């Protein structure tokens, strides 16, 4: 059998397509959409129905390679509190980052007794003097993705909590008697005590409750 001139172009097209791992038939693999391509190249876990107190959904990722945070809170010499974060498998995104979830990226949000204090893009922060009143308070650092979702493992937020106790200045302690005249005693900078997290990265338990030894979770 001989080939006509009209058949040669069709043959050439088929050879090129086969070389490019495609067929000459009509059942070629569909081209992924932009959304499918983004999900396949940058997996970001599963968004859960659970939310934080502000209604931000949890974004659950596997425990292996998941972001971790440990929190340390200590009193400073001026009556405030020094907060330090220790991170693992997590980096802060720069201000103005695109509002989408990227594995291991985002911000840390600092809470005191459940109320937001600041959004952090650094591992250190100072709670000013007088912000925490007399008594025991819970300070929590929680990790968020850039789209506002909460990083989570096993259905619980990635966070760390420490109990801190602010004592009254010595001049205000006692039976309530009027202080004697004279210079007012300065608060003892060593009087506040802090129960802070050790330099480890515990599994996220969500509740962030310290144990009897004062270790933050």
Image (cartoon, helix red, strand yellow):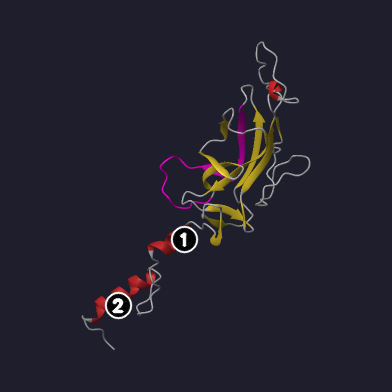
Residue 170, visible in the rendered structure: yes
The reply to whether the magenta stretch includes residue 22 is no
In the picture as drawn, the residue positioned furthest to the front comes out as 178
Residue 11 against residue 143 in the figure, above or below: below
Which residue shows up at 65% across the image and 11% down it?
Answer: 183
Residue 103 position, x and y percent, is 52, 51
Which residue shows up at 51% across the image and 53% down it?
Answer: 149
* Front-most of residues 3 and 174: 174
Question: How far apart are the alpha carbons under marks 1 and 2?
Answer: 38 Å
Residue 13 position, x and y percent, is 29, 74
Q: Nearer the viewer, mark 1 or mark 2?
A: 1
* Front-most of residues 30 and 87: 87
Quadrant where the C terminus sits is top right
* Front-most of residues 55 and 215: 55
Residue 188, visible in the rendered structure: no
Residue 38 position, x and y percent, is 43, 59
Residues in magenta?
80-103
Which residue shows up at 54% across the image and 59% down it?
Answer: 45
Identify the residue under disc 2: 11
Identify the residue under disc 1: 39
Quadrant where the N terminus sits is bottom left
Left or right: 182 in relation to 39: right
Q: Which class describes the residues within 10 Å of circle 1: few (<14), some (14-19), or many (20+)?
A: few
Residue 200 position, x and y percent, is 70, 41
- The disc label shown at residue 136, or none: none
In terms of image quadrants, where is residue 131?
Answer: top right
Which residue shows up at 48% across the image and 53% down it?
Answer: 101
Q: Which class describes the residues within 10 Å of circle 2: few (<14), some (14-19), or many (20+)?
A: few
In the picture as drawn, the residue positioned furthest to the left comes out as 5
Upstream in the sequence, badge 1 or badge 2? 2
In terms of image quadrants, where is residue 201?
Answer: top right
* Front-most of residues 75 and 27: 75
């Amino acid at each position: 059998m001989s080939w006509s001139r009209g058949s040669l172009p069709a043959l050439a097209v088929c050879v090129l397509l086969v070389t490019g791992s495609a067929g000459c038939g009509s059942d070629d693999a569909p081209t992924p959409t932009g959304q499918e391509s983004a999900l396949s190249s940058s997996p970001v876990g599963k968004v859960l129905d659970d939310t934080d107190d502000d209604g931000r959904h949890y974004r659950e990722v596997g425990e292996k390679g998941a972001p971790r945070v440990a929190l340390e809170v200590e009193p400073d010499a001026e009556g405030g509190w020094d907060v330090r974060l220790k991170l693992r498998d997590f980096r802060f995104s720069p201000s103005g980052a695109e509002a989408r979830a990227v594995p291991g990226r985002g911000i840390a949000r600092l809470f005191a007794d459940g109320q937001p204090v600041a959004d952090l893009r650094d591992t250190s922060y100072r709670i000013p003097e007088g912000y925490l009143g007399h008594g025991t308070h819970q300070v929590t650092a929680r990790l968020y993705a850039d789209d506002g979702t909460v990083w989570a493992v096993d259905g619980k937020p990635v966070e760390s909590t420490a109990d801190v106790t602010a004592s009254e200045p010595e001049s205000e302690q006692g039976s309530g008697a009027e202080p004697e005249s004279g210079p007012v005693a300065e608060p003892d900078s060593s009087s506040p005590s802090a129960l802070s997290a050790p330099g480890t990265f515990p599994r996220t338990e969500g509740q962030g409750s310290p144990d009897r030894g004062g270790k933050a979770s």
